[in-house]
Amino acid sequence: MTLTLHLAPGTISLAVHAALEEAGADYELHWLDFKAGDQTSDAYLAVNPKGRVPALETPEGILTETMAILEWIAETQAPALMPSDPWLRARARETMTYLASTAHVNHAHKMRGHRWSDDPAAQESMRAKVPETMTDSARWLESRMEGDWVAGTFSVADIYLWTVLRWLEGDGVAVADFPRLMALHDRVLARPAVARVAPQHVR
């Protein structure tokens, strides 16, 4: 079963790429150049009308949204990438939902303010707020770390979190203030599958 992942460097699609590699899945990559506007091309909008990445083509159809794709990978490709215990699985989902609904949105205010306002002054105000809001996100995420991993054992939640952690320094966050998060970042990056894909996402 060959899967096709549509992705772009420097985006959250790295999380899905790393999860597929961890799972040992049979997949192909379709890279988009955001600067060239590939995400708004008719060809890509036929894949994902949202014009965003990631999008994963599967035999059942096309799946979008990082959290949904990560859970699908864990359920169909590598069950060990999601906790089997209901409480720990809920904890993993809690963190992933926060990453999608809050941390990623905070980060997007730096470069994607046009999604929320056409006013240049408002967009600049959003950009200026990013170090504060991303620091707040890092503080909450740091408080969640009770061991080496988000939910007891290594899971797609850790891959998702690691991808967001890669943005912190560029967003003006003093990463040295969050030693547990940085330790998780290093543990995830040390995994051979993650180390194989990470260099492909430098932009």
Image (cartoon, grey):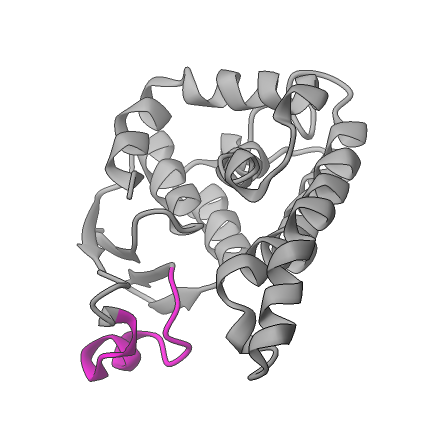
Residue 57 seen anywhere in this rendered image of the structure:
yes
Q: Quadrant of the C terminus?
A: top left
Q: Magenta residues?
A: 39-53
Query: Residue 7 location in percent, x, y?
Result: 30, 55
Q: Nearer the viewer, residue 199 or 71?
A: 199
Query: Residue 136 location in percent, x, y?
Result: 77, 43
Residue under the image location 40 percent in, 51 percent down: 11
Mark count: 0
Is residue 29 placed above or below 78 in the rendered structure? below
Query: Residue 68 location in percent, x, y?
Result: 52, 58
Quadrant of the rendered image containing residue 41: bottom left
Is residue 65 placed above or below 167 in the rendered structure? below
Quadrant of the rendered image containing residue 120: bottom right
Residue 90 seen anywhere in this rendered image of the structure:
no
Q: Nearer the viewer, residue 15 or 68?
A: 15
Q: Nearer the viewer, residue 168 or 95?
A: 168
Residue under the image location 43 percent in, 46 percent down: 73
Asked if residue 102 lies in the magenta stretch, the reply is no
Residue under the image location 27 percent in, 81 percent down: 46
Asked if residue 47 lies in the magenta stretch, the reply is yes
Quadrant of the rendered image containing residue 191: top left
Is residue 146 placed above or below 167 in the rendered structure? above
Query: Residue 32 location in percent, x, y?
Result: 23, 60
Residue under the image location 54 percent in, 76 percent down: 115
In the image: residue 113, left or right of residue 200: right
